[in-house]
Image (cartoon, grey):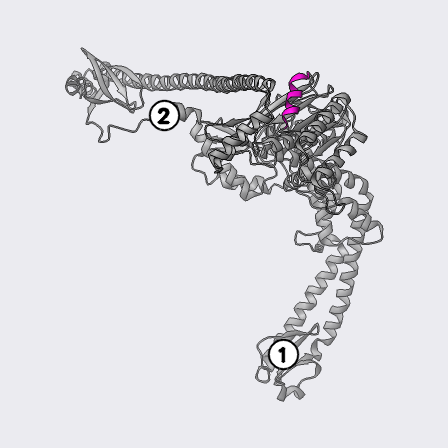
Amino acid sequence: MNKVEEVLEVDKIRQNIKKFTKTIIAKQKIDFLTPSNDFNFVKKELNKLNQALKVMNLYGDFPIRSEIDMFETINFAKKGNVFNEITLNNIKEEIQVTIDTIKYSLSIVEDYDDLNELFMSLKANEKLYNEINSAISIDNTVKDGASKTLFDIRKSIYSLNKNIHTTLNKLFSKHKDKLSGDNFVLRNGHYAIPVNSSFKSNFDGIVQDVSDSGLTTFIEPKEILELENELAVLKIKERDEVNKILFALTNKVVEEGNNLINNNEVLGELDFLAAKVKYAKEIDANIPKLNKEKTFKLFNARHPLIDKNICVPNDFILGNDKTLMIISGPNAGGKTIALKTIAICSYMVKLCLAIPVSIDSEICVFDKIYVEIGDKQSIENNLSTFSAHISSISVIFQYLTSNDLVVIDELCNGTDPKEGEALAVAIVKKLLKIRALTIVSSHYELLKKYGFTNKQILNASFIFNEKNVTPTFKILLGVSGKSYGFLISKKYGLENDIIAEAKKIYEDSFASEDDKKLHALDEKERYLATKEEKLKVRQESLNREKENLNRLNKDLKEKEIKLKNSKIDKFDTYLNDKYNEINNIYNAFIKEKDIKKAEAKLDKINLNKKKNENIAVGNYVSLKNLGIIGKVVSENGNKITISSSDGFTIKATKDQCELIEPPKDTLKPQIDADKYILNQKPVSSSINLVGYRVDDATIALDKYLDDCVLKGLKEVKVIHGYGSGKLREGIHKFLKTRKNVQSFRIGSELDGGSGSTIVTLK
């Protein structure tokens, strides 16, 4: 591992990606993942990664589950070796994965050129799959029907074994009083019966063993000797025929070797992409825009190895006329993490990985990245920390170009402060001349002053909470920072008289009038920058609130319209029913001319009329047949206004209502509608379960169907792919157990074919 990777802990990132892999090839790709300075290569790889991210978001994970290195496997056979049943089944599984992946790719309707190029290079090899499948069972044995010869041999073996068992059972029945056991045993690969040793002379045969006590002698009876000899011959023939079948299958695999190796490589590449996508999602990473101007704009950048829930994101901008950034501020305020964040994000781009920044970020592809961070004291070479630090910088200058990135922590620290400051300024001047993008951290006042006077330098500092004497880990660009040594010393218990004396010594010895003016100007800039940062945060918060309110308003309107339409539909149904009922009474009266009977039916319809006339403000009523319960809040003759239990106001007539008892629990806890609607997540009309095991698929499907029922979806699509059909069968079996499933069917051509199932919900 090189020095930069060691300092930036790049291997931890590799291991974090590797945990998402499912193939040997992908693991190897991650182990040998190296940075590239080829802009076009990085751009193509990041574009491919972006396409994989979009496809996996739309269609789910790639159906890859292979653990075989096909190149090594084929080479093993080419050396004259024969595959055993386990290896052949692994090859068959690899072919099945290839077929599943091809089917997965055919479901993608969008055009992703780089990704499609990978999918299109896969070859199905279905013929080889069928040949292996017809010969090798899932329990890794050669099937009886693999050849007619093997079938006949095993049939004869079965017949002989049956004959031997029959003969042995007859001997047991005949000599049971002379035996010391109830069943025959195998000894030295031969069938034997347990004979009481005192009767062993009564039996003809071969003694195969004697018990430890000597009381039992295991004899192979002469009656089965010839049968066992025949069986041994058949076993040899069986072994030879099995080897012949395995040899023939091995040759067929070797014939398809190039295609199988290519498929294995492509599946490994797809798995490698999938692992990078999953890692990107884990750290909330995005793919930045690449530029050739040697600039970077990293917005909301975080360190990928720090928990995203506690890491404070920051913006880092450098390039064009500003080629060097000086970061200052208090100790433990975040300077070193900032340097490492910029360096690791730049390095990850060279590794063709997504980085933990906002989607609108952009960055260039540096030729080399030089990192000088941490205590580099060299005991072996008898160098101090400062000496090792300067030694590293001198090596950097030997190779540094304008296409490189340089990151230096605590520039020229560890020696005489005045000499250190002078060296720091001189080194910065040299870096500015080379025009390599550079970020350094420092407490040196002279260096910060130089930063104010040079247009190529961008000062930056971390905001410090002076009231609480704590760092905020938030950076401000454009201002230099204080070290807050006196303030921090006071917090950690140093006596006030010592601190006061230190301030006096500092002002007398180091603070000139120019320094004081510069300090005052710096304070004003820091104050304005802090206010600007707070306004920016406030504006972002207001924008988010505005978006939330707009979304809430839209959701509320949709909900109100939907509920009103539902109530209107129910009320229309109620009115239609009453109209039909009255119409039926009228038709019956015209036909039968029985006015008393007609009046009785009409009175039955208006049975609650008198009761309804007593409805007044404050009463609780139920709208007939609509299931709406509410409180009467106003009345005007026969017309009343009802406030329903779900918060809606409804107008009705008294004869449309029934007086009811007040609900026992009239004061229901108020629902926070805003929070409820904002927490609602959209539910897709389809779920992709391709690549899932049956148990995992049913768990995911169970939760998905619950969400669909809550959202009121009536018809959804379950994508299970083709494969062996086990996943489809498992899903269908599960759907039969769901009470809220009305029916389901295999998808038509318009629905995506038999690789999907259309489910109708109640």
| Residue placed under numbered mark 2 in the picture | 672
| Secondary element type, mark 2 | loop
Give the residues in magenta: 444-454
Q: The residue under label 1 is which amino acid type?
A: Leu
Residue at horizontal 75 percent and vertical 43 percent from the top: 128
Q: The residue under label 2 is which amino acid type?
A: Asp
Q: Nearer the viewer, residue 40 or 232?
A: 40
Residue 727 location, quadrant: top right
Q: Quadrant of the N terminus?
A: top right
Q: How crowded is mark 2: few (under 14 residues within 10 Å), some or many (20 or more)?
A: few
Please say whether residue 453 is one of the residues in the magenta stretch: yes
Which secondary structure dominates the residues rendered in magenta? helix
Disc 1/disc 2 C-alpha distance (Å)? 86 Å
| Residue placed under numbered mark 1 in the picture | 171
- x and y percent of residue 46 in the render? 70, 27
Return the mark for residue 113.
none
The answer to whether residue 504 is seen in the rendering is yes
Please say whether residue 688 is one of the residues in the magenta stretch: no
> Would residue 734 appear left or right of 578 to someone viewing this image?
right
| Secondary element type, mark 1 | helix
Does 350 sit above or below residue 593?
below
> Would residue 688 appear left or right of 49 to someone viewing this image?
left
Q: Earlier in the sequence, mark 1 or mark 2?
A: 1
- x and y percent of residue 728 in the render? 57, 39
Q: Which of 460 and 501 is in front in this view?
A: 501
Q: Nearer the viewer, residue 323 or 47?
A: 323
